[in-house]
Image (cartoon, rainbow, N blue to C red):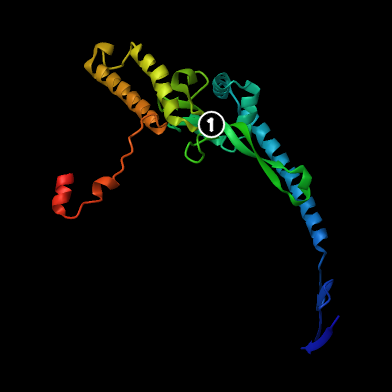
Amino acid sequence: TESKYHRHGGNLKTRSTELGSAVTGSSLTTVLPASTTVKKSIVLSSESRKELAKQAKATKEERRAQIDGRHRYLISRLADGIDLSEQQVEETIISDDKFQLIEQFFAPSGLKKLLFFYQDVLQQKLNASSRSDGSTNSLPQKKLFITMGSTEDFTGTCAFFLRTSDEVITASNISQEVNFGMLDCTNGNILQGLEFFLSQIMIPALKSQQNWGAVKEGLKSRQIQEFLYSVDKFVGALSSSKQNIEDKIQLTKVDIDIYVRNLQNPSDYITAG
């Protein structure tokens, strides 16, 4: 230990190079061993986790108290479509950090759509063999969650609710004002899921539709016939695109070198063309 004393303006200052402590005037700062600091951090993080869990539980119960007939309608549709129990869906919804989107969907002139993804997501699991350093393993697990549809990759099933007007959504009108549908895009096969949804669900429903609003002639109307034809054509384009992506159409490879090897001047290119 090396100690030096300096007198400046009547104040005695001691500077110590000892690792254990440093004294400056009347202040004392203790340098703890690294292991002690780590243990203290672990204790603090444990207390923080407990506090966060307590707050999350309080938030869930507050949201559970808000659930009414409108939420029950959504929960029932989701449970039927995704093959989960209504209790599982309810717990998922009230635990979701985007729960407020549901209220925005119900509001007058609110969100036009409400989306749910049900797919594999990476869940952080604590590694039991090395818990002291906080290391984790990422394991895929099926999860239902609310989404805006623009921030997460879509690799599973999408359940969607669409509003048909700007009216406030109530328990008495939700079945008339909100449509429900699903897209199965397992393994990221979005084109296949959209093609199936349109060809097997939407087009048969449209062709059996009797009431076309202001178009009194219904299915006999030229406008309606042209519309249905354009939808059929679009589904055909989806099918063709899907086949192209799946390499169902193979283009013959051509050895272009044998055609360009002897091209020397513009007339050769014209002849080759």
Asked if residue 50 is positioned above or below residue 226 in the image, the reply reads below
* Residue wearing tag 1: 117
Q: Is residue 74 above or below residue 251?
A: above
Residue at left offset 59%, top offset 20%: 83
Q: Nearer the viewer, residue 55 or 210?
A: 210
- Residues 85 and 10: in front is 85
Q: Residue 216 is drawn in which quadrant?
A: top left
Q: Could you say where residue 121 lies in the image, as x and y percent from the top left?
A: 59, 36
- In the rendered view of the protein, which quadrant contains the N terminus? bottom right
Looking at the image, residue 236 sits to the left or right of residue 182; the answer is left
**Residue at 37% across / 31% down in the picture?**
244
Q: Quadrant of residue 29?
A: bottom right
Rendered location of residue 265, percent (x, y): 16, 55
Eyeballing the image, is 57 above or below 11? above
Q: Give the residue type that dot 1 points to.
A: Phe
Please give the name of the residue rendered at 68% of the width and 43% of the height, measured from the top-left corner.
137
- Tell me if I can see residue 167 in this picture: no
**Residue 196 can be seen in this image:** yes
Residue 126 occupies quadrant: top right
Q: Where residue 150 appears, x then y in whole percent?
A: 47, 39
Q: Callout 1: helix, strand or loop?
A: strand
Q: Nearer the viewer, residue 143 or 147?
A: 143
Instruction: Residue at 40% x, 32% y: name it.
Output: 247
Residue 256, how many percent across, how many down?
A: 29, 45
Whether residue 42 sits left or right of residue 123 in the image: it is right
Callout 1 crowding tier (Cα within 10 Å): few <14, some 14–19, many ≥20: many
Quadrant where the C terminus lies?
top left
